[in-house]
Image: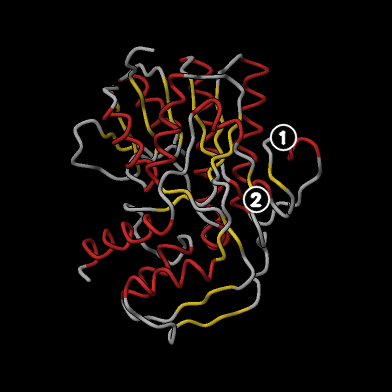
Amino acid sequence: MGLAKILVTGGLGFIGSNLVRELRSRGHDVWLCDLTHSHDPKSIRCDVSKYRQVERLFEQHDFEYVYHLAAEYGRWNGEDYYENLWLTNAVGTKNMIRMQEKRKFRMIFFSSAEIYGDYDGVMSEDIPEKIHIHLLNDYAMTKWVGEMMIKNSAMQYGTETVIVRPFNVYGPGEHYNPYRGFIPKFIYKALHDEPYTVYLGHKRTLEYIDDVCRAVANIVENFKPGEVYNLGGDELYEIKYISDLILKYLGKDDSKVTYREAEPFTTKIKRPDSTKAKRDLNFRVNVKPEEGIPKTIEWFRRVYGK
């Protein structure tokens, strides 16, 4: 496949900014949009939940591919700021789909592993179609709504979209706030000698940002409309193990850590099946936590001056 003109929505975010870099390194003409202005000459301010702003974007440019990452992220963020969550994740995605129906670009939609809800078996992509799953939070619901809207549009209008479901992506570029995942939270708190809580018994796969972006960037070279891909590693890690890894690297003890039994409203163990992504996208977890966590900590040190 030749080089393409590509838009990344949410291109200033954690995964978005790393994906923009990866796609540009391959020579693609990559533009991005996000909520705020940027120094990047190919960045356009756009709130995807405002149809007029989305329309304006596509009046100015013809894109062959759109990576749609713009979203309000996280379980508790979605509870506290549910208006923003539903507007961006549901209405915003509908706006992109409406534009896709007119412009016929190919889309790559970032869903989430959260759509597996309370399911506790091996998570293959077809599970939500086969059995009833209880979605545990509004964030998960908005991502599932996005997937359903995309499928309906494909049936009614012939739009072509690939869906990816990332699991626990981490690495440099993920700024800390109280609503982010456990890795940036643990690193930030440990760096600043602040207390944090570790829930015992939870196991997660961990995917380093570069490995995820490489696989996702490969989609434009092997685009299979209607395909859904899990992006999750094979190895499961106790959350306490990751906390210990961070503290060990920083030369600190766990005196500021509170240990609690399993956290409610979330799956204890997330065990993905990523066979398809390995086959079609050459997805591999090359960077293990023992290497990726120190790289992430060093980025935090530079950004937060510690």
Q: Residues within 10 Å of mark 2 (few under 14, many from 20)?
A: many
Q: CA distance from mark 1 to mark 2?
A: 14 Å
The residue lying at 47 percent from left, 63 percent from top is 179
Q: Residues within 10 Å of mark 1 (few under 14, many from 20)?
A: few
The residue lying at 40 percent from left, 29 percent from top is 217
For the residue pair 158 and 90, the one nearer the viewer reads as 158
* Callout 2: SS: strand
Disc number for residue 271: 2
Displayed quadrant of residue 43: top left
Looking at the picture, how far across and down is residue 186, in whole percent? 42, 70
Looking at the picture, how far across and down is residue 299, in whole percent? 27, 58
For the residue pair 184 and 215, the one nearer the viewer reads as 215
Displayed quadrant of residue 29: top left
Count numbered badges in the picture: 2
Whichever of labels 1 and 2 marks the residue nearer the N terminus, that label is: 1
Looking at the figure, which quarter contains the N terminus? top left
For the residue pair 272 and 262, the one nearer the viewer reads as 272
Q: Is residue 218 left or right of residue 173?
A: right
Query: Quick check: marks 1 and 2 in contact, CB under 8 Å?
Result: no
Q: Which residue is mark 1?
A: 126
The residue lying at 35 percent from left, 26 percent from top is 57
For the residue pair 173 and 145, the one nearer the viewer reads as 173
Vertical comparison of 226 with 189: above or below: above
Furthest toward the bottom, the residue is 255
Looking at the picture, how far across and down is residue 166, in whole percent? 53, 43
* Callout 1: SS: loop
Disc number for residue 2: none
Q: Is residue 229 left or right of residue 304?
A: right
Q: Is residue 184 left or right of residue 225?
A: left
Looking at the figure, which quarter contains the C terminus? bottom left
